[in-house]
Image: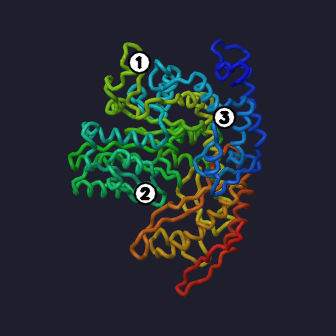
Amino acid sequence: MMSGIAPDVRQWFPSDDGNPEKRELMMKLIGQILAGTDALKDPDSVNLKGTKLRSARFYNDLLLASEIPEQGVPMEEVGEKLLELLHAHPYHTKYFLTNILPMASIPGIVGMIAAFLVNGNNLWDVYGPAGAEAEVKVIGMMSKLAGYDPLRSGGYTSWGGQGAIFSGLRIAISKHAPDARINGVPDRLFAFCSEAAHYSLFKSMEATGLGTRNLVKIRTLPDSSMDVADLRRQMARVIHEGGVPVYIVATTGTTDAMGIDNIKDIYEAVEEVSRAYNLRRPHIHADSALGGFFAFYNDYDFAANPLSLQSDTAQALQTIQRKMAHLGLADSLCFDFQKLGQTPYLTSLFLVQDAEDLRLLDLDPDETPYVGHRGYGQYHTGYTLECSRMASSISMYSALLAFGVEGYRRLLAQFVDVNLAFRREIGARIPEAVIVNPDNPGIITLFRLYPEGGRSFREELSGSCTSQEIRRTNDLNEKMFELLGQHRDRMFFGDTKKHLTVKTEDNGHAVLYASKFFAISPYTQVEHVNEIVRYLQEKIADVYARFDMQMDKGGTISVGTARSDIR
C-alpha cells in the first residue's frame, strides 16, 4: 500500500484566486525553461547545445523506453526533461537561412500565454470570449490591410495555409454544387493552380473527393508566376471536355522562389472565360500565407520614404507592392502569422471577401446541440472544419499591436536588405552559383550550380538542353544539398527539387534543382553576409573538388559518384 498523504490535485493547476504563492511557483517554472533555453544558445551556431544521436533506431528506442511514471515527477524535474527535448534543436541565429520557419516573437509568445491561461474554445464566445473578441479584431485589421470591407468580410483562425486552401475549395464546391455536402461532390468540377503552387491544393483535392486528376497545373513564367495565357487555354480545354472550373488558387508568394501571381490579370482572365461560356466565375483564392504580409507596404509613400529605405530595397519592395496591390480582388485569402507574422505555431488566418460565403459551410443548429443552439452567445463558428479551436487569434492580436505597421515594414525591409546583399556577394564571388530567381525580389534567393563547360540556366529555360543534361546538373546540385545538410548545425540553408519545370530538347519536361537562401531570422544582418558567402565558397569548392567531372564525347559534363569521405 502507498504510505503518506496523497498529493492535493490542485498543485498541478494555476490558482483560482490569484494568490501570490501559486503565481510565484509558475513564474519559477517558466523562468527555469527560459534560463535553461538561454544556457543552450550559441549565436555562432544554428542548433541549441546538446547532442542527439538520431540513428536509424532512434524513434523505435524512444517508443520502447517511454513509460508513464506511476508517481508524478516533481515539476522541476519535468522542466529538466523538457529542456532535454530542446538539445540540438535548430534555433534562429544569424545563420538560420532555411525555409519559412520564423522566430516566434516576444509579443506572439506573450499572446499565446494569455490564451493558454484562460484556455477558451474559440468555437463559441460563450466558451471562449477572449479568443472570439481577438479573432474579430484581427479579422477587421487584416481585412483592411488586404483591401476588404471589414463590415462585409469574414474569416477565422485556421490550421495553416493548407487549412485556408481547403476551406476555399469547400466554398468553391458549394457555390457551384450547393447539394454537394448532402449528395457528394460531382466529378466534373476542376481546380487550377500554377506549377509553383504549394502542394496544399493537391492534398485538398484528395480530401474533398474531387481527386487529383481534376487538378490542372498551369505553367509558370521565369519569375515563377502563373502564365495567365495558359490559364485561359486550360480553362477553355476543361470546359470543352465537359468539366466545370470552380476554383483558382493564385499564389502570392511561392515557398521556393517568392513568385507572385498577378491576381488582377487572373481575375480578368477568369471573368472573361466564364462570361464566354456562360458559367459562374470560379472562386479565386489568394494563397498569401507567405507574401501577404508585404501588403503592409501597399500604402507606403515611396517618394517620401519615411523609413529611409535603401534605394535598391525600396525598388524591390515597390515591385512586390505592385503585385500585392490587387490582393483584395481575391474571394478569399490567408495570412500565416507563424510565417512573417512572427507568432508561434499554429497561427493562421483565413479571410473571405464576403462573409456570406461562410454560410455555405455552416451547420444547421440541430447538428450542433452542444453549442450555439441557445438564446445566448453571439459568435458561433459552426462553419469551421474544426470543432475545438485554440484562441491563436490572441497571439496574432498581440503581435499586431506590438509591431504595428511600421514594425512589420522595418522587419520586412531588413529581410530584403539581407537578401539583396547576398545576391550581390554571391554574384561577385561565386560565378559557379547562378541565381535562378533573379526576377523575384523579396527574401529568397535560389542558386544553382553548373559544371564548368556545361549547359547554362538560360539554355535550360530555352528548352535546348536534353533531359540527361539537366539530370546530371541536378545530380551535382543534389550533392550540394547533401554537403550543406551535413553541416546544417553551422549554417542552415534550404533547397528545392522543383524550382521550375522546363521543356527539354528531346520533347520532354524536367524540373530544376536549386539551393535556397532564405532571409528569415531577425538576427541575420547585412554585415553577416560576407561570412555566409565565404562559407558557401568553401563548400562549393569542396563539392567540385570531390567529384570527378570529365567531358563526355558529346561535350557535356559527367558528374561522378560522391566519395564516401565527404564531411
Residue type of the residue flagged with mark 2: Glu
Q: In the visual, does 181 lie left or right of 262?
A: left
Q: In the visual, does 83 lie left or right of 360?
A: right
- Of residues 221 and 307, the one drawn nearer to the viewer in this rendering: 221
Image quarter in which the N terminus is found:
top right
Can I make out residue 153 in this image? yes
Question: Which numbered dot is residue 464?
Answer: none
User: Which of label 3 and label 2 is nearer to you?
Assistant: 3
Residue type of the residue flagged with mark 3: Pro
User: Which of label 1 and label 2 is nearer to you?
Assistant: 1
Q: Measured along the vertical axis of the image, is residue 95 above or below residue 376?
A: below
Percent across and percent down for residue 487 are 70, 59
Cα distance between the residues tagged 1 and 2 = 42 Å
Mark nearer the N terminus (3 vs 2): 3
Q: Which residue lies at the image location 69% right of the left edge and 45% below the top edge?
A: 91
Mark nearer the N terminus (1 vs 2): 2
Q: Circle 1 — which element?
A: loop
Q: Which residue is mark 3?
A: 69
User: Which of label 3 and label 1 is nearer to you?
Assistant: 3
Cα distance between the residues tagged 3 and 2 = 50 Å
Crowd band around label 2 with a 10 angstrom C-alpha radius: few (<14), some (14–19), many (20+): many
Q: Measured along the vertical axis of the image, is residue 542 above or below residue 241?
A: below
Percent across and percent down for residue 24 are 74, 20
Question: Which numbered dot is residue 195?
Answer: 2
Q: Which residue lies at the image location 43% right of the left edge and 27% below the top edge?
A: 150
Mark nearer the N terminus (3 vs 1): 3
Percent across and percent down for residue 510 are 46, 68
Crowd band around label 3 with a 10 angstrom C-alpha radius: few (<14), some (14–19), many (20+): few
Q: Which residue is mark 1?
A: 378
